[in-house]
Image: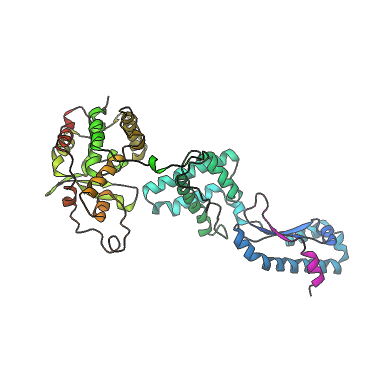
Amino acid sequence: MTDPAFIRKGTQMVRMVKRKGRNNWEIFYPLPADLRVALKTPALYRTLATGDRQEAANRYPAGVVEVILEVSKLKQRLTESPFVVQPNMAASQELQQKITPAQPTTKAISIKAVIEAWRSDLKPQLSKSTQEEYERAINRLLTWSKSRDLRFIHEFDRKKVREFVSETYHGRSGKTVKLALGGLRGVWDHSFTVGWTDDKSTIWSNHNYNDRMKIGTGEIKTDDQSELPFSFDDIRALLKGLQPVAFKQLVALALITGARSSEIANAKRDRLSLREDGYWLDIHGTKTKSAHRSVPIPRAFDPFVESLRDETTGDYLVPLFEEKEWSNERDRARYINKEINRKRRLLNLPNTHRQGVHSTRRTYIELLEGEEVPLGTIKLLVGHKRTDLTIGTYSKGTYVNLRKAVECLTVPEELSQVINVLTKYQTTPK
């Protein structure tokens, strides 16, 4: 029977603690003087098997009762066996094993092991662009961890996560950081899914970074910094001033298809087809499932499209930097877009600091909306997910007349003429 007086006395300094380098919360239980001598330790630590403070607090009362019962049994054994006060080595080791809390299983789990398991089990289920987004965060984490000599997942806590963000995402927006932390949370959680840990980690969650704030700078992105579409005057300036001509072709092709900058840079020649109603471009977008789509091209630009089809012989509709080798198409598109934007800025357009190659996509959407094309149809054309219950869940747009919609895309006649003669010039940059 446990002595109530002993319980009151023994629990005066009992508390919940989280020791440095430990992933889980623990019960700290100071021992009476006689047990300190016998066990050669001033206190017992018992794990609550969770890194979440609220969950640990919920488990704490029951955990304390278990520790009190354990200490009572140890005290009883000490009273019955006086020689335990001066134990031999074997007896001391046996007793120590019984009172030492089991170490968290996370101690044996390396960061690389968890990442490889995630890559094998979950990565293939994600879209290509999401995979690349997560891999960038993982590579940043591995580089940072190596510099800090961190090898195991239990070595990470919320403080370490904040340090990782401040050192590797300085100047990046809070939105970018949230995407990265979301990916890393998924990687960490997979260790729970496969049974390596007893609880899901919460260290990557709820850091409350402001979407618009740039990390470490205190600068907040305001509405007047958001990207703008190109005006017709902007497009005229681009089609006149950009060099080489292949850059002009990419801008024109993006304008008449509404494709993303990466999609248009990697548009393939064999994905252009002539149907009964005109030319269509099959866009193998990777950003989302909705990004993979076929888009009709307005008939007004048939001469331009036919020239692209007939005057190029390589894989791409617009051949660029053919002498370079690329590890993947994303790198190729990123390089091309960077070069176009660099030369675009030299033209000093009125809103150049708020525009990019992606602005052609905004112009495309603005023009279709101006012609009162239904929102659901615009989403089909630009590869956006249709989330409405009716237009999205029930209707997949099977009978939407996309050709009729794109023929509403009208630009000034003289601008159409400029686009339709672009391929009369050299298409490969020197």
Q: Is residue 8 left or right of residue 56?
A: right
Based on the picture, tell me whether residue 243 belongs to the magenta stretch: no
Q: Where, by quadrant of the figure, is residue 313 drawn?
A: top left
Quadrant of image for the N terminus: bottom right
> Is 408 left, or right, of 82 in this rendering?
left
Image quadrant containing the C terminus: top left
Q: List x then y, in percent, for residue 66.
A: 71, 68
Relative to the observer, which residue lies in front, 84 or 28? 28
- Drawn side of residue 136 relative to residue 232, left or right: right
In the rendered view, does 26 fall on the left or right side of 91? left
Q: Residue furthest bottom?
A: 1
Residue 230 location, quadrant: top left
Please give the name of the residue rendered at 32% of the width and 54% of the height, measured from the top-left corner.
Answer: 385
Classify 425 as above or below 279: above
User: Which colour scheme appears in the figure?
Assistant: rainbow
Image height of 360 relative to 206, above or below: above
Assess whether residue 20 is covered by the magenta stretch: yes
